[in-house]
Image (cartoon, rainbow, N blue to C red):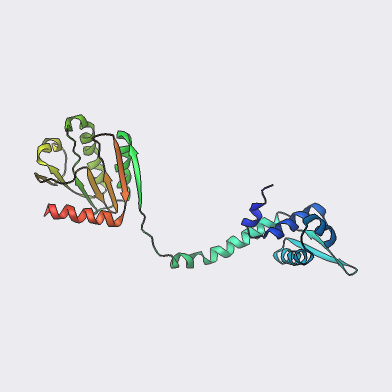
Amino acid sequence: MDEQIFQEIGLTNAETKVYLALLKTGLTTAGPLLDETKLQNSTLHKTLHSLVSKGFASFNIKGKTRHYQASNPENILKFIKEKENRFQKILPNLKQLQKPIEKQEAEIFEGFKGFKNMLYESIKDGKKGDEYLFFSFFTENPDDFNNVYNFYKEFEKERSKLGIITKGLAPSNIKDKFKGRKIKNIKFIDLPVPLNISIFKNKIIFTPWEEKQISFMIHSKQLAESFRQYFYSIWK
């Protein structure tokens, strides 16, 4: 039997031993419990008192001697439920005390399918007026990745449905890759800038596909704001 569960619901090791001994022996005096549990006499009586106060045991007096018995094990569920109900009452106060913590994590997506799932995931909380900024997807051999450029047309429709405002910076030499794409706010530049990066809310997306088709999405308010400021320093 996994006795650890008793400690997890608030019983001490001694209380667990005595309660299980009571289940085995039935109605009994302290003597047999001392033999069963190997506890010291003072510890046993203190533990019995504790179990009675918690509702895990009861006693009656015959003559001058106390006889103890374990409560129905199903009462343990009532004990747990009572604790849960008490905790539910203070939960709103605990939430008010909790200081919001910015979520910071990095996710990795593999392959073209993972790339698409990542982009849809990145805008699922988007709403009208939000900004989606990007440093264009670019590789040394752009024609090898026409599937990516074609997918971006589909992705732009999703952003448009949500009312997201899109702005982008792209190298002048891949201007033809943007034919048929409905992006009003895009500037083609000859400056050396970081590529394959998108910023949306507190998310930054990296798609360094030259060696391996692995994409990254980082959740960081600080990093997103830094890239956003850098984007606009070039945009202006």
Q: Position of residue 165 (x, y in %)?
A: 20, 50
**Residue 107: quarter of image:** top left
Q: Quadrant of the C terminus?
A: bottom left
- Whether 121 is drawn above or below 100: the answer is above
Q: Nearer the viewer, residue 214 or 146?
A: 214
Identified at 14% across, 43% down, the residue is 170
Relative horizontal placement of residue 105, taking residue 8 as reference (left or right): left
Q: Position of residue 168 (x, y in %)?
A: 17, 47
The answer to whether residue 4 is left or right of residue 175 is right
Residue 171 visible in the picture = yes
Question: Number of numbered discs present?
Answer: 0
Taking depth in this image into account, of 2 and 181 the one nearest to the observer is: 2
| Residue 29 appears in the rendering | no
Q: Which corner quadrant of the image does residue 141 belong to?
A: top left
State the residue at coordinates (66%, 48%).
2
In which quarter of the view is residue 181 placed? top left
Residue placed most toward the observer, 153 or 59: 59
In the displayed structure, 152 sits above or below 2; it is above
Residue lying at 14% horizontally and 38% vertically, measured from the top left: 178
Q: Residue furthest right?
A: 63
Measured as percent of width and height from the top left, residue 167 is found at 17, 49
Q: Residue at x 12, y 45 (%)?
A: 192
- Residue 146's spot in the image, x, y percent? 20, 31
| Outermost residue to the top | 144
In this orientation, which residue lies closer to the viewer: 27 or 128? 27
